[in-house]
Image (cartoon, rainbow, N blue to C red):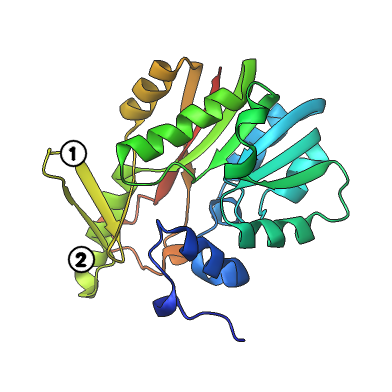
């Protein structure tokens, strides 16, 4: 059977989508790690590296980060809701004995308070507040006291920037509007995806009990978004947020 075409994939917030995307992840899913212009994510991971520490990659997908994490930390556990993605990730790290990958829904409770560090990269993106807050809460619950969070999430300001850049194309894929309650709502190819402001991130993480919250930008090129920036925007770059904090 051939790989599924993009148009044949289920909605992105569906578990079936991630199962279907597992076989052609590089074509379907934007990689923050590989498109990070300045290597901000890798630098944060290396700064947290400890051969005696345990790390959870919460929402690991097909294991993009796992090979590097296995070299930086003593023991690494990847957690992912899609069984198909778990299979791909396990094959990717089959030679790294200190890396294990689990179906998240089957193992979450037994791992509470077990980790020195948690990486959560573009997992807290469901548009429903109960869902994205639930991901952030789960990341907190996995950490030991004073454990370190490394979080990657989409930026609302970047979505607005990309929408402006797409305006001249006549075929915009990103729309930033408002929900009925007035909250910002971002849709990408018609799919709602949670995007954050910097103050919102600090407020939400502080409410969960995180401290020492630091937020910085992960910059991307225009080309990796398939765009040529209009003249008025050439001094800017699209970005995500990278957050580090302590439980």
Q: Is residue 195 visible?
A: yes
Task: Compare residues 186 and 134 and report the one nearer the observer.
Answer: 134
Q: Which mark is residue 167?
A: 2
Q: How many numbered marks appear?
A: 2
Q: Which mark is residue 29?
A: none
Which is in the foreground here, disc 2 or disc 1?
1
Query: Local crowd at mark 1 within 10 Å, few (<14), some, or many (≥20)?
Result: few
Position of residue 106 relative to residue 170, above or below, is above
Q: Quadrant of residue 149?
A: top right
Residue 232: x %, y % from top left: 24, 57
| Residue at screen point 65% across, 42% down | 42
Q: Quadrant of residue 234?
A: bottom left
Please indicate whether residue 163 sits to the left or right of residue 144 in the image: left
Residue 2: x %, y % from top left: 60, 86
Query: Local crowd at mark 2 within 10 Å, few (<14), some, or many (≥20)?
Result: some
Position of residue 21 relative to residue 64, above or below, is below
The residue labelled by disc 1 is: 183
Residue 8: x %, y % from top left: 42, 78
Position of residue 235 relative to residue 205, above or below, is below
| Residue at screen point 29% across, 67% down | 173
Question: What is the secondary structure assignment of the residue under circle 1?
Answer: loop
Task: Compare residues 65 and 15 and report the one nearer the observer.
Answer: 15
Mark 2 and mark 1: Cα distance apart in space:
22 Å
Image quadrant in which the C terminus is located: top right
């Amino acid at each position: 059977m051939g790989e599924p075409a993009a148009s044949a994939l289920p909605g992105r917030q569906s578990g079936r989508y991630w199962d279907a995307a597992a076989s052609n992840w590089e074509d379907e899913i934007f990689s923050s790690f590989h498109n990070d212009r300045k290597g901000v994510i890798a630098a944060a991971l290396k700064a947290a590296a400890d051969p005696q520490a345990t790390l959870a990659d919460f929402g690991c997908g097909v294991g993009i980060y796992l090979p590097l994490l296995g070299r930086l930390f003593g023991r690494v556990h990847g957690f992912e809701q899609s069984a198909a993605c778990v299979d791909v990730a396990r094959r990717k790290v089959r030679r790294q004995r200190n890396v294990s990958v689990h179906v998240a829904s089957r193992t979450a409770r037994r791992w509470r308070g077990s980790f020195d560090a948690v990486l959560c990269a573009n997992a807290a993106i469901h548009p429903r507040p109960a869902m994205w807050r639930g991901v952030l809460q789960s990341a907190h619950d996995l950490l030991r006291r004073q454990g370190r969070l490394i979080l990657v999430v989409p930026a609302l300001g970047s979505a607005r920037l990309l929408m402006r850049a797409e305006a001249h194309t006549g075929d915009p894929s990103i729309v930033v509007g408002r929900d009925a309650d007035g909250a910002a709502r971002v849709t990408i190819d018609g799919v709602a995806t949670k995007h954050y402001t910097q103050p919102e991130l600090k407020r939400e993480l502080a409410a969960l009990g995180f401290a020492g919250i630091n937020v910085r930008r992960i910059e991307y090129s225009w080309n990796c978004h398939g765009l040529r920036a209009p003249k008025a925007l050439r001094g800017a770059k699209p970005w995500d947020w990278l957050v580090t904090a302590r439980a």
